[in-house]
Amino acid sequence: MLKGISPLISPDLLNILSRMGHGDEIILADAHFPGESFNPTVLRADGLKIAPLLEGILPLFELDSYDDHPLIMMAAVEGDELDPLVEEGYLEAIHQTNPDIAPIARIDRFDFYDRTKNAFAVVMTGETAKYGNILLKKGVTPIK
């Protein structure tokens, strides 16, 4: 374990996050997501929910301030409904470190799959919420 880094962040995830450059994207996928079908770099975070994982990642990870939508989730397929508590829980975790971030954008399922193909990595979680996937776009880490 390291001081200041959530124990939910595995060594492999820490490696991926540190290797990502500005503009790179990472998918935090729910347990039902076909991550291995779309991207060769898949990390396992079985048993972990996405909101606590966001709480662990975002103190280490600058979101892209040059993109109007550095946070993207999948829109519901026609006939399905979104559970608003899923996004609310994510935003509660996100706002701890990014209180002024733009709202989460929603894109079509197949557009989300296309973004997954080009993502730096996919983290397969134990999240069971339907439409629980979220894309994070990395920004430039400020020098202090």
Image: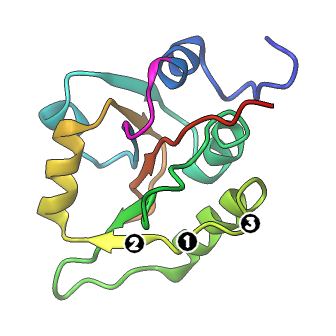
Q: In the drawing, does residue 47 fall left or right of residue 105?
A: right
**Magenta segment, principal secondary structure?**
loop
Is 91 placed above or below 120 here? below
Number of the front mark, 1 or 2: 1
Q: Residue at x 47, y 17 (%)?
A: 19
Residue 15, position in %: x, y? Answer: 52, 14
Q: Residue at x 37, y 36 (%)?
A: 24
Residue 95, quarter of picture: bottom right
Which residue does the numbered mark 1 point to in the structure image?
102
Residue 53, position in %: x, y? Answer: 62, 42
Residue type (three-letter) at the residue carrying disc 1: Ala
Residue type (three-letter) at the residue carrying disc 3: Pro
Q: Residue at x 47, y 70 (%)?
A: 104
Asked which secondary structure carries label 3, the reply is: loop
Which residue does the numbered mark 2 point to in the structure image?
105
* Region in magenta: 19-24
